[in-house]
Amino acid sequence: MAKWSAILVILMVVIAALAVEAKWSEKDFIQCFRKCSKNCKKHDGDCFEKCKIKCGGPNPPHSSSR
């Protein structure tokens, strides 16, 4: 029983560490995207898309939202 408790504690710590890392990655992406997109014109979607790719941004959902 102690083995299973130890395994569960380790898994919980790993999951918590990954969640914190993902939060910092999102913050870094936003900073990079803002810096890159300063030179983009207001309605230039290609420029914003290039910045998103450059900064390693999240992919939009590929399924229909109906």
Image (spheres, rainbow, N blue to C red):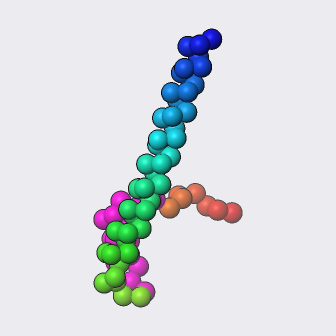
Which residue is at 59% across, 13% downward? 2
Q: Could you say where residue 41 lies in the image, as x and y percent from the top left?
A: 36, 88
Q: Could you say where residue 63 lies in the image, as x and y percent from the top left?
A: 58, 57
Q: Could you say where residue 13 lies in the image, as x and y percent from the top left?
A: 51, 34
Which quarter of the rendering shows the C terminus? Answer: bottom right
Q: Which residues are magenta?
A: 43-59
Q: Could you say where residue 31 lies in the image, as x and y percent from the top left?
A: 38, 69
Does the magenta-highlighted stretch encompass residue 22? Answer: no
In the rendered view, tell whether residue 30 sits above or below residue 2. below
Q: Can residue 2 be spotted in the picture?
A: yes
In the rendered view, tell whether residue 10 sits above or below residue 34. above
On the rendered structure, is 62 left or right of 56?
A: right
Tell which of 33 and 44 is nearer to you: 33
Which residue is at 55% across, 27% downward? 9
Q: Can residue 46 be spotted in the picture?
A: no
Query: Which residue is farthest right?
Result: 66
